[in-house]
Image (tube, grey):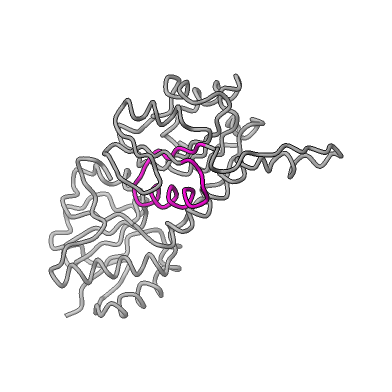
Amino acid sequence: MPVNVLFAARPERWETYEAPLRAALSEAGVEANLATQMPAHEVDYIVYAPNSGVEDFAPFTRAKAVLNLWAGVEDVVGNPTLHLPLARMVDHGLTQGMVEWVTGHVLRHHLGMDAHILGQDGIWRKDIPPLAQDRRVTMLGLGALGQACAEALGRLGFAMTGWSRSQKEIDGVTCLSGDQGLRAALQAADILVLLLPLTGDTENILNRETLAYLPHGAVIVNPGRGPLIDDDALLAALDSGDVGHATLDVFREEPLPMKHPFWAHPQVTVTPHIASETRQKSASQVIAENIRRGEAGEPFIHLVNRELGY
């Protein structure tokens, strides 16, 4: 008997996901009835985007899992009606895209490329950057995305430090945890990359106090979550020169309002939440694998820890 899979996301997502999902389910050997509408009590799996409009999971009495289309789950993990297993999206395409974006912007700041790209004014600026081994990069967040980015930067020779809430061990990365570890990680950051999940413990993790731990003139690169940073504290640090530049891909409100001071600040680069995007083909394969596992009685992959929030 086919399993019933509800695709709960905005209509434009269905247009791009329908064919890859059907193909992935077929390749996984799963016979499925895939649709955007069906009676809640008949649904076996929910492929879910938090902006879909589905907020009450209580009617889904026979569903086995909610399979999130996004890597971030902060908009659903606290839903009091959700008692089903919740899997976040860990997708090779998303990971590779994040590695490429982070590597590109870290190299941009490491090499001082802006001076030559923007400074076409006849001035011969021969400022030689240090080698990567002499540039300290800190990664806040060592989950799947953070670890992949830290390893990629480490292979380029950067002196890598990583911080996470729980202690990790990664070859080529000095791994720290805890409050004292956070301070040491920030103090070791010529370039700081944020790839933490958004939880009650990580919101505003960069604030007036913690920003002061950074070396003078440090660069911040945030492709993680907007609320990881206190905007007012960051602007003050940029105005004083304590932070040399901030490249920001995520914001508290998106699209970033036109009147937000980030747009006009000379030491801020705004990118429109493009650091990484879930790729339909590879994401569909992840979803299909979890449905195959559920039907085979095998453990789901990428399950969210409700207590930790990710």
In depth, the one of 25 and 220 nearer the eye is 220
**Residue drawn at 26 percent across, 56 percent down:** 302
**Range shown magenta:** 136-159
Image-based side of 137 in relation to 165, left or right: right
Q: Residue at x 42, y 23 (%)?
A: 210
Q: Position of residue 153 (x, y in %)?
A: 49, 48
**On screen, 270 above or below 97?**
above
Q: Is residue 217 above or below residue 282?
A: above
Q: Residue at x 84, y 39 (%)?
A: 121
**For residue 95, above or below residue 193:** below
Identify the residue at the far right of this view.
122
Residue 146 lies, in percent from the top left, at 40, 47
Q: Nearer the viewer, residue 90 or 182?
A: 182
Residue 86 x %, y %: 23, 54
Query: In which quadrant of the rendered image does the N terminus lie?
Result: bottom left
Q: Is residue 178 magenta?
A: no
**Along the line of sight, the residue nearer the viewer: 203 or 100:** 100
Res 270 quadrant in image: top right
Residue toward you, 288 or 160: 160
